[in-house]
């Protein structure tokens, strides 16, 4: 049998990613706490509750496990509503709490990557209209300046906004996130203010920290024409690419904002990007469908042969990762995979998903794509937004009633990769034998 290792570049960042509301617990002053209180908003009526109990200190246990497994970085978010509980008030105790976490990460040898907005808004922002309100970017800049000034000695890598393109779709088109609207005009207003919010955050970060690296983390859905011979399928695919993957990035590239039938220009956003943050999970085949204007005249289906996750939320199609990285390369900037993973409570799909997707990342790095790091979603099972506790993404299983952590096989695979800084045939044979012949053909 072949023996080999796909070696990653020296200094590659290996980590996991988390978000404040999903792991901290006891967040009661943000829009998601209000959303969870409304009947029918979350699957099974779930609530975040204690989540993974990070606010009470369980972050240290999880990150010690991460560091022992060879991870050298961690991405997490600072909860806006904790630091700025009211428009005219700061909570210095919350800043001290996050400072303790940052120092703890440093002690463990983990490079911190800090996200400044990961889907949650303070309740007072939500009540004034959230990102539809033109004042929200102004308040966000104040928050960003406060946080960066407090943590700039500990943090060099910043994520301004997490999946702003996904947030617009979920909140204002599909209505599954707060405020639950299905309104393209509202979506366009929110999109423009998110672009402005990113821009003011990027400028603020660089004003306070000249050597910082800052960008947003883009939700990237890979789209392929269902029929290669069909120009209509190709056009439908291009339309979805523009509406889902490129609407935010185009504004950062040239200031042009185009969404549905709406257009605008935001000059201050141009060039506000030091790296490309990509969050890739799943792919679709796209076909033109004339009777679906609400879905941009498209239909989507799973690529043939792609294995589905247990709730049908994600398909395992590694070529989508290749497409995402090829797309990211156009910006000629460093690339970080800021999220990638699969929901899998039985941990039967995750090992092969992880091995195959990381192999695609290795190929890109081997072709000089400037890929600098990979963050798996997630270290431990957490509260998955409108899907509540129905999906399990963790390398470690969480019993949310007892807060007990249980190691999964995929944690062993990821540990072997992180410690080796590469994908070895030995690790794949041991933890993902079902894809051994794909990754190491004889």
Image: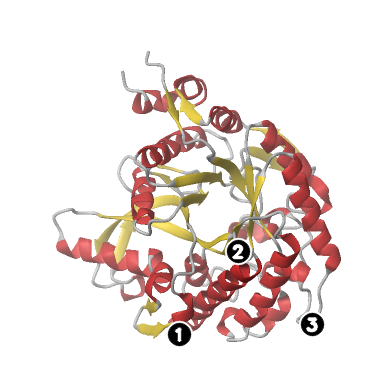
Q: Secondary structure at mark 2?
A: loop
Q: Residue 45: percent from the left, percent from the top?
A: 67, 61
Between discs 2 and 3, the one toward the N terminus = 3
Q: Quadrant of the C terminus?
A: top left
Is there a contact, CB below 8 Å, between mark 2 and mark 3? Answer: no
Q: Which circle's residue, 3 or 1, is located before the other in the chain?
A: 3
State how the image is colored.
Answer: secondary structure
Q: Nearer the viewer, residue 137 or 237?
A: 137
Residue 419, by quadrant, is top right
Q: CA distance from mark 2 to mark 3?
A: 28 Å
- Mark 2 — residue? 210
Determine which quarter of the picture holds residue 13: top right
- Placement of 280 over or under 385, stated as above or below: above
Count residues near mark 2 (Cα–Cα under 10 Å), then give few for <14, some for 14-19, many for 20+: few
Residue at point 62%, 63% (across, down): 118
* Label 3 packing within 10 angstroms: few (<14), some (14-19), many (20+): few
Mark number displayed over residue 88: 3
How far is mark 3 from mark 1, CA to CA? 30 Å
Q: Position of residue 9 (x, y in %)?
A: 47, 36
Quadrant location of residue 416?
Answer: top right
Q: Residue furthest front?
A: 210
Q: Nearer the viewer, residue 408 or 59?
A: 59
Q: Secondary structure at mark 1?
A: helix
Q: Where is residue 57 shown, x and y percent of the image?
A: 82, 48
Q: Where residue 135 sits in the image (x, y, percent)?
A: 62, 86
Going by the picture, which residue comes out furthest to the right? Answer: 93
Front one among 83 and 177: 83
Q: Which mark is residue 185?
A: 1
Question: Is residue 225 rendered to the left or right of residue 34?
Answer: left
């Amino acid at each position: 049998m072949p023996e080999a290792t796909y070696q990653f570049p020296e200094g590659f960042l290996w980590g996991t990613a988390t978000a404040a509301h999903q792991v901290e617990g006891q967040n009661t002053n943000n829009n998601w706490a209000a959303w969870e209180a409304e009947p029918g908003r979350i699957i099974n009526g779930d609530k975040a509750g204690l989540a993974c109990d990070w606010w009470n200190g369980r972050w240290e246990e999880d990150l010690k496990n991460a560091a022992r497994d060879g991870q050298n970085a961690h991405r997490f978010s600072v909860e806006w509503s904790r630091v700025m509980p009211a428009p005219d008030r700061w909570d210095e105790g919350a800043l001290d709490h996050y400072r303790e976490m940052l120092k703890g990460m440093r002690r463990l040898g983990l490079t911190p990557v800090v996200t400044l907005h990961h889907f949650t808004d303070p309740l007072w922002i939500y009540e004034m209209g959230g990102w539809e309100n033109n004042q929200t970017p102004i308040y966000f800049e104040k928050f960003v300046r406060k946080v960066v000034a407090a943590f700039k000695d500990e943090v060099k890598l910043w994520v301004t906004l997490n999946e702003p393109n996904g947030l617009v779709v979920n909140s204002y088109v599909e209505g599954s996130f707060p405020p639950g609207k299905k309104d393209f005009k509202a979506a366009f207003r929110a999109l423009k203010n998110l672009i402005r919010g990113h821009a003011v955050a990027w400028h603020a970060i660089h004003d306070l920290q000249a050597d910082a690296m800052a960008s947003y983390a883009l939700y990237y859905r890979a789209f392929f024409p269902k029929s290669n011979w069909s120009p209509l399928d190709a056009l439908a695919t291009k339309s979805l690419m523009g509406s889902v993957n490129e609407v935010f990035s185009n504004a950062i590239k040239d200031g042009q904002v185009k969404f549905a039938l709406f257009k605008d220009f935001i000059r201050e956003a141009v060039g506000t990007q030091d790296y490309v943050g990509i969050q890739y999970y799943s792919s679709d085949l796209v076909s033109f469908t004339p009777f679906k204007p609400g879905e941009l005249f498209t239909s989507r289906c799973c690529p043939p042969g792609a294995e589905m996750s247990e709730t049908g939320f994600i398909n395992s199609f590694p070529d989508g990762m290749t497409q995402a990285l090829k797309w990211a390369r156009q910006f000629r900037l460093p690339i970080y995979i800021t999220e990638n993973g699969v929901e899998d409570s039985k941990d039967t799909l995750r090992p092969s998903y992880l091995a195959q997707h990381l192999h695609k990342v290795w190929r890109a790095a081997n072709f000089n794509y400037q890929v600098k790091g990979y963050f798996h979603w997630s270290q431990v099972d957490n509260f998955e937004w409108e899907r509540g506790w129905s999906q399990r993404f963790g390398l470690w299983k969480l019993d949310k009633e007892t807060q007990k952590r249980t190691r999964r096989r995929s944690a062993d695979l990821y540990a072997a990769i992180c410690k080796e800084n590469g994908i070895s045939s030995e690790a794949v044979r041991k933890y993902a034998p079902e894809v051994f012949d794909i990754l190491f053909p004889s």
